[in-house]
Amino acid sequence: MSTTHSTGLDLRPNVTDRFVWEPLPDGCLLYEESTGDLITLNDPAELILSHCDGERSIQELCTLMESEFELVPATTRTLIEGLLSAGVIADSSSHNFTPPGS
C-alpha cells in the first residue's frame, strides 16, 4: 500500500477559494481578504496556477509545463510546493474554485 504526502506527484491540485486573483502584466496578484496577505506571482507561477484545475496531477503539470512552455520539472515542482505551502492550491478533494478567465 502506498501513501501520498502533500507534495506527492499524484496529488491533483486545485486553486483554493481563499484568494482574490488579480491579473498583472507580468504575473498576478493574490489577495487574501481575511488576513490582508498579498502574494505576487511571476509569469511561470501564474501559468502553473492557471493549470491547477483539480484534474491534472503534479506529474501531469510538470510534463505539460515542460512540453508546452519549456519549464523544467524541478522548477514546476518547486513553484507548486510554494503554492501549496502558501495555501493558494490544495488537493482537489479539499477545495473547488475556478480562477477568473477560465
Image (cartoon, rainbow, N blue to C red):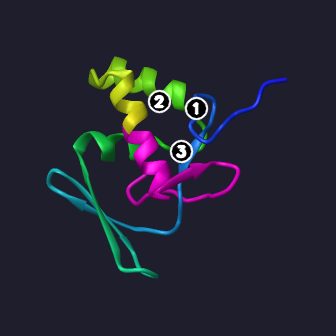
**Horizontal and vertical percent position of residue 29:** 27, 63
Mark 2–mark 3 Cα distance, whole angstroms, equals 10 Å
SS state under label 1: loop
Q: Foreground residue, 81 or 15?
A: 81
Q: Secondary structure at mark 2?
A: helix
Q: CA distance from mark 2 to mark 1?
A: 6 Å
Question: What residue does disc 3 label?
Answer: 53
Q: How many numbered circles are shown?
A: 3
> Which portion, as a residue range, is magenta?
79-102
Expressed as whole percent of the image width and height from the top left, the position of residue 31 reads 35, 71
Residue 61: which numbered mark, if any?
2
Side of 40 where 13 appears, left or right: right
Q: Do labels 2 and 1 touch, CB within 8 Å?
A: yes
Separation (CA) of disc 3 from disc 1? 9 Å
- Residue at 45% over, 42% down: 81
Three-letter amino acid code at disc 2?
Leu
Q: Please name the amino acid that badge 1 sits on.
A: Ser
Find numbered disc 3 in the image and state the secondary structure of the residue it sits on: loop
Please give the name of the residue rendered at 14% of the width and 55% of the height, measured from the top-left corner.
25
Residue 3 magenta: no
Q: Amino acid at mark 3?
A: Asp
The structure residue drawn at horizontal position 38% and vertical position 56%, both measured from the top left corner, is 101
Task: Choose mark 3 or mark 1, whichever is in front.
Answer: 1
- Dot 1: few (<14), some (14–19), or many (≥20) neighbours within 10 Å? many
Density class for disc 3 (Cα within 10 Å; few <14, some 14-19, many ≥20) is many
Check whether the beta carbons of the residues at disc 3 and disc 1 lie within 8 A of each other.
no
* Marked residue nearer the N-terminal end (2 or 3): 3
The residue that mark 1 highlights is 57
Residue 41: percent from left, percent from top:
27, 53
- Give the percent coordinates (x, y) of residue 24: 19, 59
- How crowded pointer 2 is (Cα within 10 Å; few <14, some 14-19, many 20+) is rated as many
Q: Is residue 74 above or below residue 55?
A: above
